Amino acid sequence: MRISELSQASGVSIPTIKFYLRERLLPQGTPTARTQADYAEGHLHRLRLIQALTEIGGLRLRDVRAVLQAIDDQALGTHELLGTVHHALGPHLDGEPSHDEVQAIAEVDRFLGGLGWRVSQAAPARRTLARALTTLRRMGRDADAAVFEPYARVADELAAREVATVSSTGSRLEAVEGAVEGAVVGTVVFEAALVALRRLAQEHHSARRFGPARRD
Protein backbone atom coordinates (compact mmCIF):
# COMPACT_ATOMS: atom_id res chain seq x y z
CA MET A 1 0.00 0.00 0.00
CA ARG A 2 1.10 3.58 -0.58
CA ILE A 3 1.67 6.01 2.27
CA SER A 4 -1.71 7.63 1.65
CA GLU A 5 -3.39 4.23 1.98
CA LEU A 6 -1.35 3.50 5.12
CA SER A 7 -2.53 6.81 6.56
CA GLN A 8 -6.15 6.06 5.73
CA ALA A 9 -6.02 2.52 7.14
CA SER A 10 -4.33 3.58 10.38
CA GLY A 11 -5.96 6.97 10.96
CA VAL A 12 -2.49 8.49 11.37
CA SER A 13 -1.69 11.58 9.33
CA ILE A 14 0.93 11.41 6.58
CA PRO A 15 3.19 14.01 8.30
CA THR A 16 3.15 11.90 11.49
CA ILE A 17 3.98 8.74 9.54
CA LYS A 18 6.89 10.55 7.85
CA PHE A 19 8.08 11.71 11.28
CA TYR A 20 8.04 8.12 12.57
CA LEU A 21 9.98 7.05 9.47
CA ARG A 22 12.60 9.77 10.03
CA GLU A 23 12.92 8.80 13.69
CA ARG A 24 13.28 5.13 12.65
CA LEU A 25 10.32 4.13 14.80
CA LEU A 26 8.65 2.79 11.66
CA PRO A 27 10.69 0.72 9.16
CA GLN A 28 11.22 2.14 5.71
CA GLY A 29 8.93 0.84 2.97
CA THR A 30 10.04 -0.94 -0.20
CA PRO A 31 11.08 1.75 -2.74
CA THR A 32 8.94 1.81 -5.90
CA ALA A 33 10.17 5.15 -7.28
CA ARG A 34 12.55 7.94 -6.26
CA THR A 35 10.03 9.49 -3.85
CA GLN A 36 7.60 6.61 -3.35
CA ALA A 37 7.56 3.39 -1.37
CA ASP A 38 5.26 0.47 -0.75
CA TYR A 39 4.12 -0.44 2.76
CA ALA A 40 2.86 -3.81 4.01
CA GLU A 41 0.54 -5.04 6.77
CA GLY A 42 3.52 -5.16 9.09
CA HIS A 43 3.90 -1.39 8.80
CA LEU A 44 0.23 -0.93 9.64
CA HIS A 45 0.50 -3.19 12.69
CA ARG A 46 3.65 -1.42 13.92
CA LEU A 47 2.03 1.96 13.38
CA ARG A 48 -0.99 0.96 15.47
CA LEU A 49 1.37 -0.27 18.19
CA ILE A 50 3.22 3.05 18.21
CA GLN A 51 -0.10 4.86 18.55
CA ALA A 52 -1.11 2.60 21.44
CA LEU A 53 2.17 3.32 23.21
CA THR A 54 1.96 7.08 22.69
CA GLU A 55 -1.77 7.80 22.88
CA ILE A 56 -2.95 5.17 25.38
CA GLY A 57 0.27 4.56 27.25
CA GLY A 58 1.41 8.19 27.16
CA LEU A 59 5.00 7.12 26.53
CA ARG A 60 7.74 9.51 25.53
CA LEU A 61 9.44 8.85 22.19
CA ARG A 62 12.61 7.59 23.86
CA ASP A 63 10.56 5.04 25.79
CA VAL A 64 8.68 4.04 22.63
CA ARG A 65 12.03 3.52 20.95
CA ALA A 66 13.23 1.32 23.82
CA VAL A 67 10.10 -0.83 23.59
CA LEU A 68 10.37 -1.20 19.81
CA GLN A 69 14.06 -2.08 20.08
CA ALA A 70 13.15 -4.74 22.62
CA ILE A 71 10.54 -6.15 20.22
CA ASP A 72 13.13 -6.37 17.45
CA ASP A 73 15.74 -8.00 19.72
CA GLN A 74 15.52 -11.66 18.77
CA ALA A 75 17.50 -12.70 21.85
CA LEU A 76 14.97 -11.16 24.23
CA GLY A 77 12.27 -13.41 25.67
CA THR A 78 8.65 -12.44 26.26
CA HIS A 79 9.17 -12.03 30.02
CA GLU A 80 12.09 -9.65 29.52
CA LEU A 81 10.11 -7.76 26.88
CA LEU A 82 7.15 -7.27 29.22
CA GLY A 83 9.58 -6.01 31.85
CA THR A 84 10.84 -3.41 29.37
CA VAL A 85 7.26 -2.33 28.66
CA HIS A 86 6.28 -2.07 32.33
CA HIS A 87 9.43 -0.08 33.08
CA ALA A 88 8.61 2.30 30.21
CA LEU A 89 5.01 2.69 31.39
CA GLY A 90 6.27 3.72 34.80
CA PRO A 91 5.45 5.16 37.21
CA HIS A 92 8.52 7.39 37.07
CA LEU A 93 9.29 8.83 40.50
CA ASP A 94 11.83 11.64 40.60
CA GLY A 95 14.68 11.97 43.05
CA GLU A 96 16.26 9.55 45.46
CA PRO A 97 13.98 7.77 47.97
CA SER A 98 13.87 9.22 51.45
CA HIS A 99 15.09 7.28 54.49
CA ASP A 100 11.51 6.31 55.30
CA GLU A 101 10.96 5.14 51.73
CA VAL A 102 14.11 3.01 51.78
CA GLN A 103 12.84 1.24 54.89
CA ALA A 104 9.40 0.87 53.32
CA ILE A 105 10.91 -0.62 50.14
CA ALA A 106 12.62 -3.28 52.26
CA GLU A 107 9.27 -4.07 53.91
CA VAL A 108 7.57 -4.22 50.53
CA ASP A 109 10.22 -6.65 49.27
CA ARG A 110 9.63 -8.92 52.27
CA PHE A 111 5.88 -8.68 51.69
CA LEU A 112 6.25 -9.60 48.01
CA GLY A 113 8.55 -12.45 48.95
CA GLY A 114 5.94 -13.74 51.38
CA LEU A 115 3.43 -13.76 48.54
CA GLY A 116 5.85 -15.86 46.51
CA TRP A 117 5.95 -13.25 43.75
CA ARG A 118 9.00 -13.15 41.46
CA VAL A 119 9.61 -9.42 41.06
CA SER A 120 12.68 -7.66 39.67
CA GLN A 121 14.55 -5.19 41.86
CA ALA A 122 14.22 -2.76 38.94
CA ALA A 123 10.40 -2.84 38.97
CA PRO A 124 9.23 0.79 39.38
CA ALA A 125 6.04 -0.28 41.19
CA ARG A 126 8.09 -1.43 44.21
CA ARG A 127 8.85 2.17 45.08
CA THR A 128 5.28 3.22 44.34
CA LEU A 129 3.98 0.69 46.84
CA ALA A 130 6.61 1.77 49.36
CA ARG A 131 5.60 5.40 48.93
CA ALA A 132 1.95 4.44 49.54
CA LEU A 133 2.99 2.72 52.76
CA THR A 134 5.04 5.72 53.85
CA THR A 135 2.11 8.04 53.12
CA LEU A 136 -0.22 5.93 55.27
CA ARG A 137 2.19 6.23 58.18
CA ARG A 138 2.60 9.96 57.76
CA MET A 139 -1.18 10.23 57.95
CA GLY A 140 -1.05 8.53 61.35
CA ARG A 141 -1.98 5.02 60.26
CA ASP A 142 -0.21 2.25 62.18
CA ALA A 143 0.23 0.12 59.06
CA ASP A 144 2.71 -2.34 57.66
CA ALA A 145 2.93 -3.82 54.17
CA ALA A 146 0.40 -6.52 55.08
CA VAL A 147 -2.29 -3.84 54.74
CA PHE A 148 -1.99 -4.38 50.97
CA GLU A 149 -2.72 -8.12 51.14
CA PRO A 150 -6.41 -7.94 50.08
CA TYR A 151 -5.42 -5.79 47.10
CA ALA A 152 -2.59 -8.18 46.27
CA ARG A 153 -5.01 -11.12 46.09
CA VAL A 154 -7.25 -9.26 43.65
CA ALA A 155 -4.24 -8.05 41.62
CA ASP A 156 -2.83 -11.58 41.44
CA GLU A 157 -6.04 -12.97 39.99
CA LEU A 158 -6.35 -10.15 37.46
CA ALA A 159 -2.71 -10.40 36.37
CA ALA A 160 -2.98 -14.17 35.93
CA ARG A 161 -5.94 -13.67 33.60
CA GLU A 162 -4.16 -10.93 31.64
CA VAL A 163 -0.90 -12.82 31.16
CA ALA A 164 -2.86 -15.92 30.13
CA THR A 165 -4.18 -14.00 27.12
CA VAL A 166 -0.66 -13.58 25.68
CA SER A 167 -0.42 -15.94 22.73
CA SER A 168 2.35 -18.54 22.68
CA THR A 169 1.64 -19.54 19.08
CA GLY A 170 2.38 -17.87 15.75
CA SER A 171 5.51 -15.90 14.87
CA ARG A 172 7.70 -14.29 17.50
CA LEU A 173 6.84 -10.84 16.15
CA GLU A 174 3.11 -11.50 16.46
CA ALA A 175 3.56 -12.90 19.96
CA VAL A 176 5.70 -10.09 21.33
CA GLU A 177 3.71 -7.29 19.71
CA GLY A 178 0.53 -8.87 21.05
CA ALA A 179 2.15 -9.05 24.48
CA VAL A 180 3.10 -5.38 24.31
CA GLU A 181 -0.38 -4.36 23.23
CA GLY A 182 -1.83 -6.45 26.05
CA ALA A 183 0.49 -4.84 28.58
CA VAL A 184 -0.43 -1.34 27.43
CA VAL A 185 -4.15 -2.05 27.45
CA GLY A 186 -4.01 -3.95 30.73
CA THR A 187 -1.85 -1.40 32.51
CA VAL A 188 -3.44 1.79 31.23
CA VAL A 189 -7.01 1.10 30.16
CA PHE A 190 -8.11 -1.60 32.58
CA GLU A 191 -6.16 -0.02 35.43
CA ALA A 192 -8.27 3.11 34.97
CA ALA A 193 -11.39 0.92 34.83
CA LEU A 194 -10.35 -0.84 38.04
CA VAL A 195 -10.00 2.47 39.87
CA ALA A 196 -13.39 3.60 38.58
CA LEU A 197 -15.09 0.36 39.60
CA ARG A 198 -13.57 0.55 43.09
CA ARG A 199 -14.94 4.06 43.59
CA LEU A 200 -18.36 3.04 42.31
CA ALA A 201 -18.33 0.03 44.62
CA GLN A 202 -17.43 2.27 47.58
CA GLU A 203 -20.39 4.50 46.76
CA HIS A 204 -22.65 1.44 46.54
CA HIS A 205 -21.56 0.04 49.91
CA SER A 206 -21.71 3.47 51.53
CA ALA A 207 -25.29 3.84 50.32
CA ARG A 208 -26.17 0.41 51.67
CA ARG A 209 -24.63 1.08 55.08
CA PHE A 210 -25.18 4.78 55.64
CA GLY A 211 -27.72 5.95 53.08
CA PRO A 212 -31.49 6.16 53.42
CA ALA A 213 -33.44 2.96 53.04
CA ARG A 214 -34.36 2.20 49.44
CA ARG A 215 -38.01 2.44 48.55
CA ASP A 216 -39.09 -0.11 45.96
Image (spheres, rainbow, N blue to C red):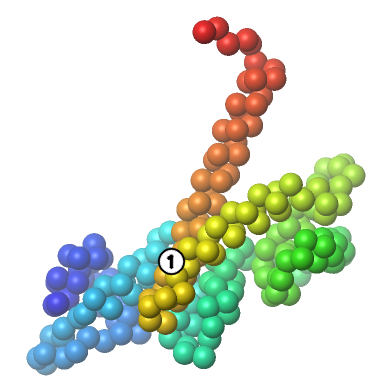
Q: Does the rendering let one see residue 87?
A: yes
- Name the residue at 86% across, 52% down: 144
Q: Is residue 129 above or below residue 79?
A: above
Q: Is residue 3 left or right of residue 169?
A: left
Q: Is residue 148 above or below residue 168?
A: above
Q: Quadrant of residue 158?
A: bottom right
Which sits in the foreground, 41 or 117? 117
- Name the residue at 70% across, 20% down: 209
Per the image, label 1 sits on a secondary structure element best described as helix
Residue sitting at the far left: 33
Quarter of the image with the N terminus is: bottom left
- Name the residue at 71% across, 71% down: 118
Residue 9: x percent and y percent? 20, 65
Q: Is residue 5 left or right of residue 125?
A: left
- Name the residue at 90% across, 44% down: 142
Bin the neighbour count of mark 1 within 10 Å (Cα to Cα): few under 14, some 14-19, many 20 and up.
many
Residue sitting at the far right: 142
Which sits in the foreground, 165 or 58? 165
Which sits in the foreground, 57 or 197? 197
Q: How many marks?
A: 1
**Label 1 amino acid?**
Glu
Which sits in the foreground, 207 or 172? 172
Check disc 1 and report the residue beneath it: 181
Q: Is residue 119 left or right of residue 104?
A: left
Residue 61: x percent and y percent? 44, 74
Q: Does the rendering let one see residue 81?
A: no
Residue 190: x percent and y percent? 50, 51
Q: Quadrant of residue 196?
A: top right
